[in-house]
Image: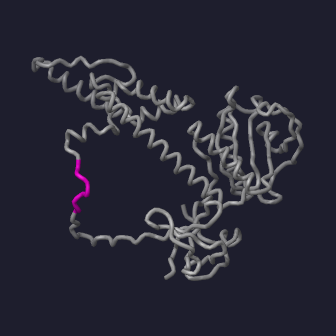
Amino acid sequence: MPFAKCKVYSDGSHYIAIPPKPQKPRPKKGAKVKKEAPDLEELDDDEAEDCPFDKPAQPVQSVQLSLFDGEKNDDKQGESEENGSKNEQTCEENEEQTKDTPSRKDLFDTLYKKYIFEPKAKRRKILCKELRPYCKDDSETELFVELNLQRKQKNLIARRIRMTRKANLQEFNYFVTLTYNSAIHTEDSFRKKLRTTLSHFCDRKGWRYMGVWERSPEKKRLHFHGIFYIPDGMLSGEMEDINSFNFTTRRRQITKQNSFFAKRFGRNDFEKIEDKNRLGDALAYIMKYIEKSGEKIVYSRGLAQFFISDVMDEDIICPMGEEYQKLLLADDFGCWNEGEYIGQVSRETITKMPKAN
């Protein structure tokens, strides 16, 4: 039996299909929906309070202590009725202050970004030390830090998978490095102007790209690394050979610099991607930096993770994945769009297929 409207992606070697999951029927309007009993035992109120997530980031010893200014609330018990209005006003101020106070999760994210370049063991100790005043004891602090570190790692893996799937469905042909000249731009204007320029080139010239903002290790100067698809004849300016010194390898090298970007931004390097190995090296470089810095990947619009195709039985090699929910496809499987045969899988055929993320 063929599978309709499967999401198909490439892992770099093979094509893999994800069949759609059956949808549960929606209840009719006005019909009463019975809530199913949870499989797991729910937490009691006391246990739920001990759960180390999304609490206001306030020290345990003083509930009214602000995260930033450290001022204590001077409420006293047993005051006379004359001070009742003052107490009510103070409570309202404390409630507003609690709403504005970031949660412990937000505080963790801020500290994680601050100490991201520290070694993992040292970073864990610093996080535990900084977050200790906002937890009941050492064990809760360690649990909270461990769970949030797992969250960060899980998010990183998801970003890595998303980037790989997008890259494998494209045909990138340049690895580009773009920097700015201080006489032309500030750091903020460089970011803004480069984004605008690349956006216009994507809309008007058919460019596609993905990349990451990076800072040099010593001077902390901002630059942009990315892999680009630039159609033939759609690269503005002229390409020039520049003989420069590479401080990383400590050797002189010949780089390809584009006159359009050199005039408007500063130094740049357009390296031609000749084969899949070089593309893999470029992807590995970008992934290494996002793991090290926590920077988000920048994508041009229109980069999809999947294309949608019907899958025939004869094109399936075997089921795979967790609970066999995925299908390994033959290298020459046929692409079908709503029952219409489009052609054998290829770059040209994929461009004709509907896309999805």
Residue 171 x/y as whole percent: 72, 60
Residue 196 x/y as whole percent: 67, 46
- Position of 313 compared to 238: left or right? left
Residue at the location (21% across, 65% down)?
34
Q: How many marks?
A: 0
- Position of 205 compared to 293: left or right? right
In the foreground, 217 or 300: 217
Residue at the location (41% across, 24% down)?
129
Residue at the location (17% across, 24% down)?
85
In the foreground, 357 or 249: 249
* Dominant secondary-structure state across the stretch colored magenta: loop
Residue 56 x/y as whole percent: 33, 33
Question: Is 40 rendered above or below residue 309?
Answer: above
Question: Is 63 rendered above or below residue 7?
Answer: above
Question: Is 84 rendered above or below residue 293?
Answer: above
Instruction: Decide whether residue 145 is among the magenta residues.
Output: no
- Position of 159 compared to 206: left or right? left
Which image quarter is the C terminus in?
bottom right
Question: Where does the magenta region start and end?
Answer: 35-42
Residue 289 x/y as whole percent: 63, 40
Q: Quadrant of residue 234?
A: bottom right
- Position of 139 compared to 186: left or right? left
- Colour pattern of the rendering: one colour
